[in-house]
Image (tube, coloured by chain):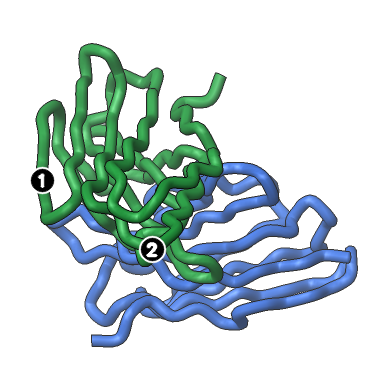
Chain colours: A green, B blue
Amino acid sequence: QKEVEQDPGPLSVPEGAIVSLNCTYSNSAFQYFMWYRQYSRKGPELLMYTYSSGNKEDGRFTAQVDKSSKYISLFIRDSQPSDSATYLCAMSGPGGYNKLIFGAGTRLAVHP
Amino acid sequence: EAGVTQFPSHSVIEKGQTVTLRCDPISGHDNLYWYRRVMGKEIKFLLHFVKESKQDESGMPNNRFLAERTGGTYSTLKVQPAELEDSGVYFCASRPSGGPYEQYFGPGTRLTVT
């Protein structure tokens, strides 16, 4: 069983839609939860970072962590064609400086 | 400020040959990580340097892979001899000591072993 499960998609939505991306995990030791965005032929770029449970909002992006369910989400409001990319969830254990454990990534396409 | 750079961007080699990948982290970042993504799989951790010391090399697949970070600046990852299953994208990331915990990724080196 993978430590982090993420539906690879692809997910196709119209411009302006609300997008919901999710990951589940099995390791209860994970404390740091991140969402990375990766454009084609580029490296992952950090979008959101959350410590432990709770919500965090940054502009059109909201990250949610539910440690009791081992479930994290990323919501994108008013999606734009420029949001078309692969979204990767990643997690790490205590300390935050540890290795990142990634999900497979979800390919998102936002069409005009 | 320059980001993490990796060289080459793409390498095509034959099975049995040797390849060396290079990563230049962001200046002043003591922590340097190597990850790789093979076809259809998730990005997986290979190893972590703190300055010139290997902090965690639990993800290195076998002894055909050798990572070095002499002087605590740039790092190299050598694959010798390369096998077909080594094909994939190799990412380097760096992070400063202390918080925040964001790892800054390079663009990756795409390795193709034929």
Locate residue B106 relative to residue B42 in the image: left or right. Answer: left
Disc 2 crowd, CA 10 A, few/some/many (<14, 14-19, 20+): some
Which mark identifies residue A57?
1
Locate residue B33 relative to residue A94 in the image: left or right. Answer: right
Tell me if residue A32 comes above or below residue B52 in the rendering: above
What residue do we see at 59% from left, 71% from top? B109
Cα separation, mark 1 vs mark 2, equals 20 Å
Tell me if residue A81 comes above or below residue A22 in the rendering: below
Q: Mark 2 lies on which chain?
A: A
**What percent of the width, then of the height, locates residue B34?**
48, 59
What residue do we see at 31% from left, 46% from top? A17
Quadrant holding the N terminus of chain B: bottom left
Q: Mark 1 lies on which chain?
A: A
**What percent of the width, then of the height, locates residue B101?**
20, 53
Which mark identifies residue A105?
none
Locate residue A24 relative to residue B29 in the image: left or right. Answer: right
In front of the other: A2 or B31: A2
Number of the front mark, 1 or 2: 2
In front of the other: B21 or A90: A90
Disc 1 crowd, CA 10 A, few/some/many (<14, 14-19, 20+): few
Q: Are marks 1 and 2 on the same chain?
A: yes
Tell me if residue B76 comes above or below residue B43 in the rendering: below
Q: Mark 2 points at which residue?
A: A81
Q: Name which of mark 1 and mark 2 comes first in the sequence.
A: 1
| Type of amino acid at the residue the image marks with label 1 | Glu
**Residue A19 visible in the picture:** yes
Quadrant holding the C terminus of chain B: bottom right
